[in-house]
Image: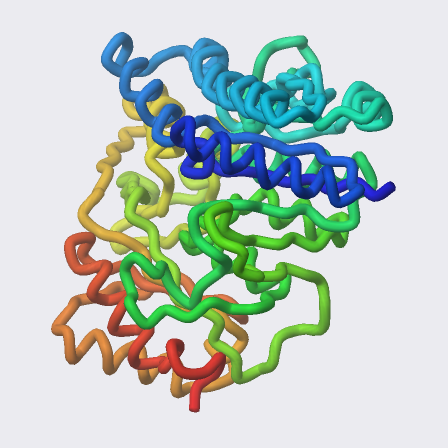
């Protein structure tokens, strides 16, 4: 009997009716002759609500306590889905991340899975039970509750699927696949039937929220296909898979972010200062992926809001000793076009520049790679730029430039 691992996102379990719908889908799979392990996210906006409450209590709450707080959301969902499955007459058992054997490092708030000791899950499946696992969480090597960062339930599901020997991991969300752009922003966005791991990693890193970046990287490492589909329809969804490199003329999508901060650090004129600051930021877990030297010894980084807080904490002790100053800027957003054509076809850059000129939007080019080209634009114009790029590249018509 084969094992299927399914993951259901927060919108899929937002209320009692949706929880019952998820339970029915799980039972259908189980009745089809497969063992089912389902990973569940926190209901609706639970995580955001708990985060807001924590920051009302403490502007910078301890990260360990945040993990204790936020991990409760997935446990609630997990138990409720198990109850709904039992009501349908099928045996079910719910596990926390630690009970499911998800072992992580000690990084609170953004822990990385080190291994999955899935024997309890395996035993329950072999006993004929449907297993529900609370996503987004695990237990550290120091026996502390940890969380895996935003979108961590995707990573939980992929890690469990690999540990259990599943042939595919099914990710159920509120959209029926991966689109050429956010369909709630771009009316003409088109569902993509298949994408490679490399393309999905670029789209996710650029801001596409349908999958968590770590989950795609982990799936690629284990060559585990992912099926992204809606929990509300029977559409086929999008297959994320290994395979030959995408065609050189392919542009697969436009993605954007609205929660990034440009942190500019002044006083970086010499190499010793650069090395000292870089070491401090890396030690604090701050990504240096998007970084640029500015005039007069300044350094700019594009960071998430969470990383910005970590960066400020890391830089604070260096201010007086090194005469540093830093300032966060939240007025811009990053828009990226993903696909091999950004490197092989000059028409992509021409189309992007033309779209910006027609919209009269100022932009600052910040990053280029063999399959991704991105720029910073004013945050209040980001959705207009996404639509303009999507139209200019004709992504709603065909998978590549015409």
Is 395 or 133 nearer to us in this picture? 133
Quadrant into which the N terminus falls: top right
Query: In the rendering, at what x and y percent does residue 10 appear?
Result: 44, 34
Query: From where the camera sits, is residue 134 visible?
Result: no
Residue 212 horizontal/vertical position (percent): 52, 44
| Residue at screen point 50% across, 58% down | 177
Horizontal placement of 78 versus 45: left or right? right
Which residue is painted at 63% across and 48% down in the image? Answer: 217
Looking at the image, residue 186 sits to the left or right of residue 248; the answer is left
Query: In the rendered image of this protein, does residue 276 appear above or below residue 349?
Result: above
Q: Quadrant of the C terminus?
A: bottom left
Which sits in the foreground, 47 or 222? 47
The structure's colour scheme is rainbow
Task: Find residue 84 and report its image quarter.
Answer: top right
Residue 321 lies, with reference to residue 272, above or below; the image says above
The spot of residue 176 in percent (x, y) is 48, 56
Residue 276: horizontal and vertical position, in percent?
Answer: 46, 33
The correct choice, above or below, for 153 with respect to 81 in the image is below
Q: Can residue 229 be seen at all in this image of the molecule? A: yes
Residue visible at 86% across and 27% down in the picture: 126
Q: Residue furthest left?
A: 360
| In this rendering, position of residue 364 left or right of residue 134 | left
Vertical arrangement, residue 197 with respect to residue 400, above or below: above
């Amino acid at each position: 009997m084969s094992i299927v691992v399914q993951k259901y996102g927060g919108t899929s379990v937002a209320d009692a009716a949706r929880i019952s719908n998820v339970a029915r889908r799980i039972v259908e799979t189980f009745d089809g002759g497969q063992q089912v392990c389902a990973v569940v996210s926190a209901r609706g906006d639970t995580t955001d609500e708990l985060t807001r409450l924590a920051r009302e209590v403490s502007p910078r709450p301890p990260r360990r306590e945040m993990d204790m707080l936020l991990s409760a959301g997935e446990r609630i969902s997990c138990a409720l889905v198990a109850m709904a499955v039992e009501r349908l007459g099928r045996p079910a058992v719910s596990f926390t991340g630690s009970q499911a054997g998800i072992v992580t490092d000690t990084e609170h708030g953004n822990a990385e899975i080190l291994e999955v000791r899935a024997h309890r899950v395996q035993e329950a499946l072999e006993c004929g039970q449907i297993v529900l696992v609370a996503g987004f969480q695990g237990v550290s090597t120091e026996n502390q509750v940890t969380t895996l960062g935003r979108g961590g339930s995707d990573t939980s599901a992929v890690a469990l699927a690999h540990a259990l020997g599943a042939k595919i991991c099914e990710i159920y969300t509120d959209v029926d696949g991966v689109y050429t752009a956010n369909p709630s922003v771009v009316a003409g966005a088109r569902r993509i039937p298949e994408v490679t791991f490399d393309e999905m990693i670029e789209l996710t890193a650029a801001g596409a929220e349908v999958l968590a970046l770590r989950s795609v990287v982990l799936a690629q490492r284990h060559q585990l296909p992912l099926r992204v589909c809606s929990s509300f329809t029977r559409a086929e969804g999008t297959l994320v898979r290994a395979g030959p490199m995408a065609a050189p003329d392919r542009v697969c999508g436009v993605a954007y972010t609205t929660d990034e901060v440009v942190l500019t650090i002044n006083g970086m004129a010499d190499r010793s200062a650069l090395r000292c600051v870089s070491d401090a930021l890396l030690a604090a877990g701050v990504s240096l992926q998007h970084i640029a030297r500015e005039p007069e010894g300044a350094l700019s980084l594009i960071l998430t809001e969470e990383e910005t807080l970590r960066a400020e904490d890391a830089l604070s002790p260096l201010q007086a000793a090194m005469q540093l100053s830093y300032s966060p800027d939240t007025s811009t957003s990053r828009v990226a076009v993903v696909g091999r054509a950004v490197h092989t076809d000059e028409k992509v850059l021409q189309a992007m520049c033309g779209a910006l000129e027609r919209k009269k939007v100022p932009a600052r080019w910040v990053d280029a790679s063999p399959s991704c080209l991105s720029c910073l634009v004013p945050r209040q114009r980001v959705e207009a730029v996404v639509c303009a790029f999507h139209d200019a590249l004709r992504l709603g018509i065909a998978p590549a430039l015409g």
